Image (spheres, helix red, strand yellow):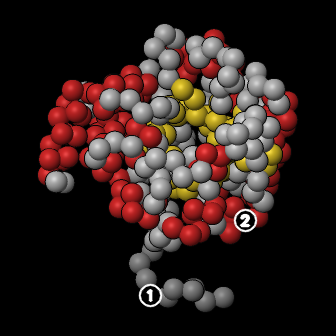
């Protein structure tokens, strides 16, 4: 049989170079399939190994949250500064431009409003719809210690099974019950349970004492939850400490969209997460950008 490419130079198979088998850059993700790893690369920056996620899913249980009254006005302009966006499918379809190239982390649980017991959640998204939306991950609350603890964990494991079927990672969000103490012991418990039962990454709150043990005892990436609105320096310091102690990034909402200058704030957070800028320097950057935006 004739050569398929006659007349070309002899082939070079680089016999002197062994085939490389490079580990995936993200903690605990080497055994995942190509599809999951590729989706993770849309959430986490492969260079820094970290992410700045913007959480705007608050409306799924508390309605039009302050700062999120008009997502098209307040959030869309700052999308270029986030690596990933955490939100509901309703807001994604109605408001977020389809040209957005960051990772979409889709809220998959819901049910009760702030008027009811929040741990009484169910799965609220079909995994096939998540595929239609081309999301990078799906996320669900896990209420360890809550009234409906077993149900929430079962919801998560069902979502993990579906995620493996379709190649979509699952983010477990460690929600804190009304009567639970926010300390490292509790978050070690909640994060480890979530990872042991299959979540590929976990979002949890920062605690000043022992956060590094929460990260160390969890075999998958930990993302720091922003929590309630803080003064800018406090929020930047919290993000810095979390990353220094091993967090793979932050998922901030109110500390960005409730800031006086959301675009300036998210850019300052980026500098901390990806470049490990000191909080005082990040605050100066925030103030400079804020003054330029006036």
Q: Image quadrant for the C terminus?
A: bottom left
Q: Position of residue 204 (x, y in %)?
A: 57, 29
Q: Position of residue 280 (x, y in %)?
A: 21, 26
Is the residue marked by circle 2 packed among few (<14), some (14-19), or many (20+) residues within 10 Å?
few
Q: Position of residue 222 (x, y in %)?
A: 55, 31
Q: Secondary structure at mark 1?
A: loop
Q: Secondary structure at mark 2?
A: helix
Q: Position of residue 208 (x, y in %)?
A: 45, 14
Q: Is residue 183 visible?
A: yes
Instruction: Specify whether 26 is left or right of 244.
Output: right
Could you say which is closer to the camera, residue 288 or residue 26? 288
Q: Do the numbered discs 1 and 2 sit on residues whose CB atoms are within 8 Å?
A: no
Q: Is residue 40 visible?
A: no
- Sooner in the amino-acid sequence: mark 1 or mark 2: 1
Could you say which is closer to the camera, residue 191 or residue 86? 86
Could you say which is closer to the camera, residue 278 or residue 30? 278
Q: Quadrant of residue 277?
A: top left
Q: Which residue is mark 1?
A: 7
Q: State the separation of the CA atoms marked 1 and 2.
A: 51 Å
Is the residue marked by circle 1 packed among few (<14), some (14-19), or many (20+) residues within 10 Å?
few
Q: Quadrant of residue 176?
A: top right
Q: Which residue is mark 2?
A: 129
């Amino acid at each position: 049989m004739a050569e398929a490419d006659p007349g070309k130079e002899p082939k070079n198979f680089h016999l002197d170079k062994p085939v490389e088998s490079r580990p995936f850059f993200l903690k605990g993700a080497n055994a995942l399939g190509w599809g999951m790893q590729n989706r993770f690369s849309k959430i986490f920056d492969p260079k820094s190994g970290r992410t700045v996620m913007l959480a705007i899913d608050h409306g799924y249980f508390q309605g039009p949250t302050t700062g999120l009254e008009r997502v098209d006005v307040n959030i869309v302009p700052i999308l270029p500064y986030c690596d990933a966006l955490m939100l509901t499918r309703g807001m994604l379809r109605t408001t977020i431009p389809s040209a957005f190239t960051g990772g979409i982390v889709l809220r998959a649980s819901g049910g009760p409003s702030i008027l009811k017991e929040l741990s009484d959640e169910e799965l609220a998204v079909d995994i096939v719809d998540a595929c239609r939306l081309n999301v990078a991950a799906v996320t669900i609350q896990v209420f360890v210690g809550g009234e409906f603890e077993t149900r929430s964990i079962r919801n998560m494991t069902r979502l993990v099974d579906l995620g493996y079927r379709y190649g979509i990672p699952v983010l477990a969000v460690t929600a804190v019950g009304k009567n639970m103490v926010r300390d490292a012991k509790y978050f070690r418990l909640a994060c480890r349970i979530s990872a042991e039962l299959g979540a590929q990454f976990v979002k949890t709150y920062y605690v000043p004492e022992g956060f590094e043990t929460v990260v160390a005892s969890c075999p998958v990436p930990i993302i720091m939850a922003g929590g309630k609105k803080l003064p800018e320096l406090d929020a930047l310091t919290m993000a810095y400490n979390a990353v220094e102690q091993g967090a793979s990034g932050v998922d901030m909402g109110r500390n960005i969209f409730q800031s006086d200058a959301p675009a300036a704030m998210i850019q300052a957070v980026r500098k901390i997460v990806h470049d490990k800028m000191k909080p005082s320097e990040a605050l100066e950057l925030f103030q400079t950008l804020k003054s330029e935006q006036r």
